[in-house]
Amino acid sequence: MLRLLVVIAIVLVRSEAQIERADNVISEYEQSIEQWKVQMEIAESETVRQKLSEERPSDEMAARRLYHEIGGRLADQEVVPYIGWLFDTMPHFLQSGPELNEGEVVRDALLRYHYKTAGAGALCMKMYPYASVRDIEFMEKVATDAPLDADRGLANLALSLALQQIGDESEVRLRRLEVLKQAIIQVPAESTFEGRLCQDMIREQIFGIRYLSKGGTAPTFVSKLQTGVEWRLEHEGRSGMVALAFLGELQPSGQVLDGVLSDMADLLHQSGGELVLISTVTSEGRPYGVHLYDRDSQVTELYQVQDMPSIILLDESGTVQSKGEPGELINLAIRALAEAL
């Protein structure tokens, strides 16, 4: 009996030491990142800045150190916040792959042990930006089986956000509406994520499905041209299609993007339509399209655009026809426009 008690005591001491070391890994990494940011801000020249950028504290090393401390305890509830930190801070370390890796081991543990763990809903919210098929499976289990309403609600919200990245098909939108209806009921009014009220995020998701998905009527807005003159997007009285090109801080000049936008502007012009370039910075005028200065990102936020560049194509009545994401999806939007002409 005494020997058993000694063994238990040793295990407990080791567990506490592992948690303490895991805390130290996170603390050391965050401190080093803050120091590095300060050095970057006060760098005296571009040469110094370039040298400092190469000396950025290693995410990979910190992730491996943390995993070393918690990897043998993935079934324990105490490690869930540390898994959340990895998803939030270093999602690339937990990327899924065809072979068994740290990410797959962690996902196995989540699906096996933690879909009923308190805080699983908050973990789902950290997972959604880079959600894999198995992450969505975990969210669905939490949304269905977690004992706490708050966890089920956050899992449902995370599920909608993750599904949004899959596509805009009608069945996806329907599924998102189903889980959002549950989230409205389950998520506490005061619940927040990264400083934002979760109920506000739910309302934005529903707004996006209703107005910004294919077939929805896009919201009208008032903004300003790069020259400072007011410009309005109205649906009444318009005879052609409109493509809203959200560029953020990107400058199309001298890039492949410039040719893509120019081609789209030509296609629109042939049908009496219009290309609207929306930038959050002042930029040089291009020989095509209308150029808006979205200084406070009001239009960008209204249309819930996160990835730049993004293109939303509207028909003459303001109905969303297609949405283009970075890379090859912009070309998809161009093809959709060509087909519609």
Image: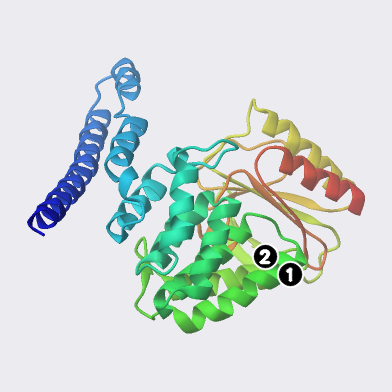
Looking at the image, which residue sits at the far top? 47
Residue shown at 52%/64% (left/top)? Answer: 139
Looking at the image, which residue sits at the far left? 2
Residue placed under numbered mark 1 in the picture = 216
Q: CA distance from mark 1 to mark 2?
A: 6 Å
Q: Nearer the viewer, residue 112 or 295?
A: 112
Tell me the amino acid under the disc marked 1. Gly
Task: Find numbered disc 2 in the image and state the secondary structure of the residue it sits on.
Answer: helix
Q: Position of residue 208 (x, y in %)?
A: 62, 67
- Count of numbered circles in the view: 2
Q: Position of residue 124 (x, y in %)?
A: 45, 61
Residue shown at 48%/51% (left/top)? Answer: 107
Task: Find numbered disc 1 in the image and state the secondary structure of the residue it sits on.
Answer: loop
Tell me the amino acid under the disc marked 2. Leu
Can see residue 264? yes
Q: Quadrant of the N terminus?
A: bottom left
Image height of 325 relative to 33, above or below: below
Residue 329 appears left or right of 47 = right
